Amino acid sequence: MSIARKLKAEPERKLFHATMLVTRAEEWWVEAETLEEAQALLAAGKGHRHALGELVHVEFHALLAEDD
């Protein structure tokens, strides 16, 4: 019986692709005179990235399978 198990063909593996949305928190800094000015500068993309953050959220969107 153990020989039959060894001779049994394994199922063919297929390749699957997924679309994922990955969001991470980053630390940014900006020089400003007030909190409101700092918020406006950061919202306008005028800040400087201090460090990459850890992955904090992954959302599965779709799974695509290759057709034979």
Image (tube, helix red, strand yellow):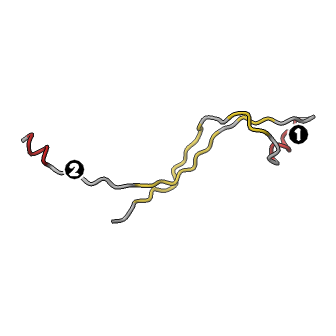
Q: Dot 2: within a 10 Å radius of its alpha carbon, few (fewer than 14), some, or many (20 or more) residues?
A: few
- Give the alpha-carbon distance from disc 2 to disc 1, as whole Å: 63 Å
Given residues 67 and 61, the one toward you in this image is: 67
Counting every numbered tag in the picture gives: 2
Q: In the rendered image, which residue does mark 1 sit on? A: 36
Q: Quadrant of the N terminus?
A: top left
Looking at the rendered structure, the kind of residue marked 2 is Glu
Looking at the rendered structure, the kind of residue marked 1 is Glu
Residue 55 x/y as whole percent: 59, 38
Residue 5 x/y as whole percent: 13, 44
Q: In this view, does 7 lie to the left or right of 52?
A: left
Q: In this view, does 30 lie to the left or right of 57?
A: right
Q: In which quarter of the image is the C terminus?
A: bottom left
Instruction: Residue lying at the far right in this picture: please name it.
Output: 33
Given residues 60 and 46, the one toward you in this image is: 46
Residue 44 x/y as whole percent: 82, 48
- Asked where in the image residue 28 lies, by quadrant, the reply is top right
Seen at 8% across and 42% down, the residue is 3
> Vertically, is 16 above or below 43?
below
Please report whichever mark, 2 or 1, sits nearer to the chain's N-terminal start.
2
Instruction: Residue lying at the far left in this picture: please name it.
Output: 1
Seen at 66% across and 36% down, the residue is 52
Residue 58 x/y as whole percent: 55, 44
| Label 2: which secondary element | loop
Q: In the rendered image, which residue does mark 2 sit on? A: 10
CB-based contact (under 8 Å), mark 2 and mark 1: no
**Residue 53 got which mark?**
none
Q: In this view, does 18 lie to the left or right of 15?
A: right
Q: Dot 1: within a 10 Å radius of its alpha carbon, few (fewer than 14), some, or many (20 or more) residues?
A: few
Seen at 73% across and 34% down, the residue is 50
| Label 1: which secondary element | helix
